[in-house]
Image: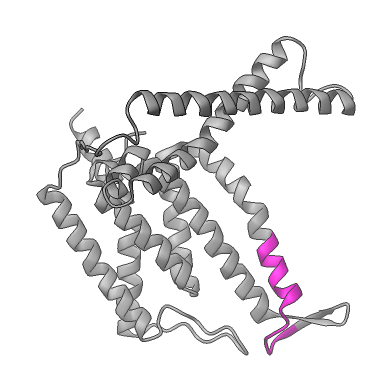
Amino acid sequence: MNSVFSDYHPIVSFSYFTIIIIFTMIFKHPIFIGISLISAIVYALILNGKKALKLNILFGLPMFIMIAIANPIFSHKGATILFYLRGNPITLESIMYGIISASMMLSIIMWFNVYNVIITSDKLIYIFGRIMPSIALMISMTLRLIPKLVHQTKVITETQRTVGLDCNSGKLMVKVKSCMRVLSILVTWALEDAVQTADSMKARGYGYGKRTTFTIFKFTKQDGIMLSFIILVVIICFIGYGVGIGNLRFYPTIAHIKFDKLSILMYIAFLIINSLPIFLELREEIKWKSLK
């Protein structure tokens, strides 16, 4: 799907996702983590649809459960003991901290999923190409490699299935042999693709002489307004984080969530910055329907 947010200048969209992911990592507060997670899920649903969202959640759910369970098992801090497991206390505080940490990781995964849709390899090379051209190219190729391998694996699997070799059917040894054959073909394809890429880059003169740049991206007034708005909201969030609103104390007891004026202002600011692309998508959808 073509996103409205992807039409903004790469610096604007890259700055936005960088800020959101950093805030999600440093905040240890249920309200902020909840806002970030829900916003990421809703935006991923708008961009990728239900099927892709379901796959991402199924991928992140085992990690969520593992982190949520691991923290109370290995960390026994907290004053509210719920029960004992093999002589070790399981506390309410460690369970809640584990849930918050797991939610934070799931939120980051969802935001990176959206990031990969908006920030294409061309945009990434544009942002870092002049400063760090080699690193920008390496990052772009690395991010592109995994989707290519996944797609090629599907192609190879379907092709092998037409000749009677299926990784999902037959006896165990038959499955293993079929999967090893798919893996062997995939590795061979990856090596050939790497050689072709290197030859193509060499044929186009990569690494010889001074690099030239070309861009189709122009920083407009709309980009300036959006970037200024993002910076303003970020300043409010950093002020709130500086006075301790961004973190909630979990040990030895869970602190009460504050609802004073400054806290509410920061909650609203964080909600606005997280839901900004969602608002843009919904506004465009309403505008499009009204013109039909």
Extent of the magenta region: 66-81
Question: x and y percent of residue 287 in the render?
Answer: 21, 38
Q: Is residue 240 above or below residue 102?
A: below
Question: x and y percent of residue 12 in the render?
Answer: 25, 53
Question: x and y percent of residue 125 in the render?
Answer: 32, 43
The reply, left or right, for residue 251 in relation to residue 45 is right
Residue 79 part of the magenta-drawn span = yes
Residue at 40 percent across and 24 percent down: it is 200
Looking at this view, name the residue that lies furthest to the top: 163
Figure quadrant of residue 238: bottom left
The reply, left or right, for residue 83 in relation to residue 135 is right
Along the line of sight, which residue is nearer the eye, 26 or 86?
26
Residue at 10 percent across and 50 percent down: it is 221
Q: Quadrant of the N terminus?
A: top left
Figure quadrant of residue 232: bottom left
Residue at 29 percent across and 42 percent down: it is 6
Asked whether residue 184 appears in the rendered view, the answer is yes
